[in-house]
Amino acid sequence: MPYVGARVKRIEDPKFITGSARYVDDIAYPGTLYMAILRSTVPHARLLRVDYEDALKIPGVVGVITGLNIEVENRPRNFPMAKDEILYVGHPIAAVIAEDRYKAYDALDYIQVDYEPLPAVVDPEEAVKDKVKAVEDTSNIGYRWTYKAGNPEEELAKSDVVIETKLEIGRVYPAAMEPRGLLSVYQEGRLTVYASTQAPHYMRKFLLDAFRNYVSDIRVIQADTGGAFGSKMFPYPEDYIVTYASIIYRRPVKWVATRREDLLSTYHSRAQIHRIKAGFTRSGEWRALIDELIIDLGVATHGYYLADITSTLITGPYKLRNVLVEVYGVKTNKTPLDQYRGAGRPEAAFVYERIMDMAADELRMDPIEIRRRNLVTELPYTNPFNHKYDSGNYLHLLSIAEGYYRDFEKRAEELRRQGRRVGVGLSFYIEQNNFGPWESASVRVKSDGKVLVIIGAAPHGQGDATAIAQIVADELGIDISRVEVSWGDTELIGEGFGTFGSRTLTLAGNAALLAARKLKDKLRRVGAALMGVNYEDVVYENGVVKDVKSGKSLSIEDMANALTASIGGTWTYPVEPSLEEMTYFGLNGYTYPYGSHVALVEVTEEGLVKVLDYVAIDDVGLVVNPMLAEGQVIGGVIQGFGEVVLEEVKYDNDGNPLTQTFSEYWIPSIMESFNVKWYYLEEGKSNAPLPAKGIAEGPLIGVLPALTRAIERAVNRRITKIPIDPSLLIK
Ligand code: MCN
């Protein structure tokens, strides 16, 4: 002790490394039916007729569902299935429910779909023109907003140097190792839903909204979830269909996506184009930005808010005040767009850091110097769009990053002399987290004296349970082996939001801390009553309450025992006989961590990108478990390498997806992975009782511009789009 700040090993891991974890597909109920989905193979068409008579004749097929008539929020045309218009390849058209999975998939071949093809909208820049419609009878411009601050036009006209460019961040698929899946179990008017999710309470709320007339309640249990990366926050069409099937057939129904289905139907992300004009003074002061932002929303508009996040953070950690961002959220006949790790902030960082590097080149300035000249120096600072950057010392962090940058440059020089194509890149970024207003935690002493913490958040790989056990063990002054952490069941804890937006440690961690604090007080009250002494004279220390006057004491176990041992006899309760407390904790506003990444990269003659060295430096206030935080940074940087070099969801000109398996959609493997060194400062504390901020998304924000710049320098060609066109990499 203290545990907070220490590299405590993950308490979550034993079940995973012994193979006893239970994902949705491992959960078995007798009599379970399986669902298979018939998906559209054309991007846009009028749906004329679905004939499933032959499918129903197949032994083992229980039923077929089409055109499900339930209104759900924010899905294509607000229905889980195509009704009269097919809108993208992968759009659910029919669902077969059968006694086993193979029969269900086989029966799909016996369904006949008649449709009349319609032209598809594929190119987002064409979509803006609104000539061909992605969704019949509606405008392609699903979202339109203007963000303006200061006098961008005037300041641009006055600028000594104007950078004019088009920057693109490709469309990606959040490739969780476990595809999406759901098991819905109908029992006497109630449902229990096992889901691969990062937000079980959201799942309950949305499903209940849709099925309120069919069931009295829905309990959602988060199965062990093999990654989500933002993509498993809200229910998808299949979740509604499988739930509906279990209600009408009154049986458990399971659906787990195949990888191809997952790639086609899990909502994609990023997909932004920025047409930029950025004005600088000769001395490198960034004076103005005009940005036309086109976000390719696919066929449903709910992803538009990602452009809002990007726009309002487009000035990054810099002092720029004159900004105009014109946002066009356009519909195309593609899979809908939604959040993916970083959600709008990586896109912003790619833009402002590309601008910084391009301006440095144009002005022949050192990339560190131009950043130093523009970085915010006085914190707290309110940016032009009302983000209140809360705390930290940006210049100090930059000076540390500079040390690595200079060292990498020296090494790069040396390698260049040997004829190798080597480059160095540096990024500086600002992060925004704690989306979702609050999180809940309860802390209770069980009858054996063990302490159970339940959180409303829903971790799925991050290791938050370990960090929360550290926090509670420290607060109660007990050994960490006596603390258990549970989550992911809407009946375990009243309400909660989930794990996303790098919020869990800060919000659920603080809720757990405050609940443990309340519990200490309750232990004093109960202890005083049990010992027959005055509450005021009782102190709590390291799992024991003690009466300072008499020297009498009781341990947590003694009290748990005393409260739960006696069934008969008379008993009076001078205090509430519970050893349990609950807290909901919310921060007033967001927190803004920040950091810098430095990359040393070689590009071979054949165009292979090799990262020779990589350093990430973050300031997230108090770091509870540096090993867990470092794990997030390493994973995030490698994931970002995928985005810069390998990963892009591609469509042909007619709207047919060209990336339908992992042999076309490349995620980084161990072969592309590299060592990442992580350092942290603790200067930018949040104002929560436990002064932490989130770490989980920062690495994916810092990596995109740092790697891009390093590669740009190595190949000596201007890079304006990620993933980088391989033809730019070959010598
Ligand atoms: N931590 C810490 N000290 C801090 C901040 C965090 O020790 N000051 C630790 C935490 O205890 C936790 C980890 O770092 O173990 C990340 O915590 P936090 O930053 O609070 O982020 P969340 O737990 O809320 O994770 C969400 C985040 C998001 S938004 C995406 S997307 C993402 C990510 O987590 N998806 C992931 N990392 C992922 N990791 C895995 N394995 N799988 C995913 O789907």
Image: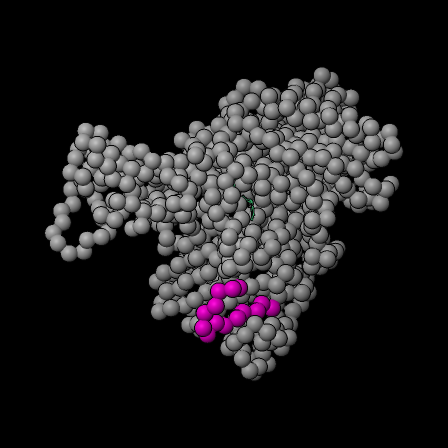
Q: Nearer the viewer, residue 195 or 143?
A: 195
**Above or below for 337 versus 49:** above
Magenta extent: 25-38
Position of residue 532 measured from the top left corner of the image (x, y, whole percent): 15, 38
Q: Quadrant of residue 691?
A: top left
**What is the quadrant of the N terminus in the image?**
top left
Name the colouring of the figure.
one colour
Q: Quadrant of residue 638?
A: top right
**What is the quadrant of the C terminus in the image?**
top right
Q: Nearer the viewer, residue 473 or 702?
A: 473
Indicate left or right for 706 with 319 as reference: right
Asked if residue 220 is among those painted magenta in the image, a careful observer would answer no
Residue at 54% across, 80% down? 60
Q: Is residue 275 among the parts visible in the rendering?
A: no
Q: Quadrant of residue 349?
A: top right
Q: How many marks?
A: 0
Position of residue 152 measured from the top left corner of the image (x, y, whole percent): 64, 25
